[in-house]
Amino acid sequence: MGRASGKPPGRPLSDAVRMDVHAPWTWSANPGATVYGETLRKAKQGEWRRWDPRRSKVASGLLRTSGAAERLLPAPGDHVLYLGAGHGTTVSHIHDVVCHGGAPGRVVAVDLSPRCLRDLTRLSHARPGLVPVLGDARRPEAWRAWLPRRASWVFQDVAQAHQASIFTSACERFLVPGGRGLLSLKVESDRGTDADGLRVKVEHELADAGLILEEVIDLEGFEDKHLLFVVGRPPRA
Ligand SMILES: C[S@@+](CC[C@H](N)C(=O)[O-])C[C@H]1O[C@@H](n2cnc3c(N)ncnc32)[C@H](O)[C@@H]1O
């Protein structure tokens, strides 16, 4: 972990997020604590946390997108659904964003590994609004009560077979009309299809589910064999 002080890093994307050439930074909702050994930078009334793009597909997507990076992120106060939360690396930065300035945001962080849940639960003690859920993304009936209203942002990073259909079901059930979804796709995880074939297949699945594909971001170099699909759910007519 590094600690530095001085001027804020990079340029602002919002009050909660800044971007330098190598990484985004988030304004910490829990200053003084690191989650995964990330660099902290002190500021007058708090602290910035460097968001490592080699450890987070959302962070690498922010660096690689050809559009406005801020559109990939939720806003302060949003309720969001995160499937495949792992040990909380990316979750913690998303929590910084939705709970920025004391906003009543909520991150419902689902993972099926008890070891991950142990770390997420520890993290949640210092971060109100982070809701760790031991559950299977494929069985939402078991955990949907933790998401009392639809999410404005859904992210999925489960790295397992049938990733696209798990994601489209989650968006159909839980993404608010007008909301945005990000699917991190591990290209190797669906057997029997090459990378290009898999990409086309996923694009069709997203379209069939009524989702508008905005961008496919290749994360090669940060996360090899990973694509990040950015979709929007059309607003109700
Ligand atoms: C690549 S890791 C997630 C890393 C995390 N998103 C991050 O950026 O820090 C994939 C996670 O998905 C979880 N996972 C795999 N299949 C799942 C499923 N069906 N439901 C919920 N979690 C699942 C695994 O336990 C693992 O923690």
Image (tube, rainbow, N blue to C red):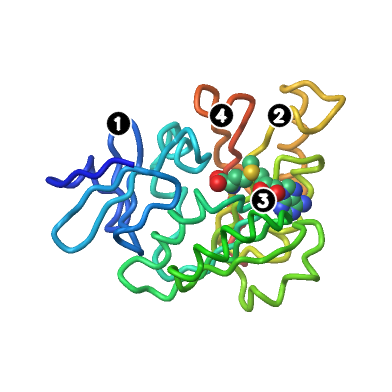
| Above or below, 4 relative to 27 | above
- Indicate the position of residue 167 as horizontal and vertical percent values: 72, 51
Q: Residues within 10 Å of mark 4 (few under 14, many from 20)?
A: some
Q: Amino acid at mark 4?
A: Glu
Q: Which residue is mark 3?
A: 211
Which of label 1 and label 3 is nearer to you? 1
What is the C-alpha distance between the residues marked 1 and 2?
Answer: 27 Å
Q: Do the numbered discs 4 and 2 sit on residues whose CB atoms are within 8 Å?
A: no
- Indicate the position of residue 216 as horizontal and vertical percent values: 58, 34
First in sequence, mark 4 or 2: give its number.
2
On residue 223, the disc is 4
Q: Amino acid at mark 1?
A: Val
Residue at point 57%, 69% (across, down): 131
Residue at point 39%, 66% (across, down): 76
Question: In this view of the protein, which residue sits in the foreground, 126 or 59?
Answer: 126
Which of label 3 and label 2 is nearer to you? 2
What is the C-alpha distance between the residues marked 4 and 2?
Answer: 11 Å
The N terminus lies in quadrant: top left
On residue 187, the disc is 2
Residue at point 45%, 52% (across, down): 73
Q: Say if residue 87 shows up in the picture.
A: yes
- Indicate the position of residue 164 as horizontal and vertical percent values: 75, 44
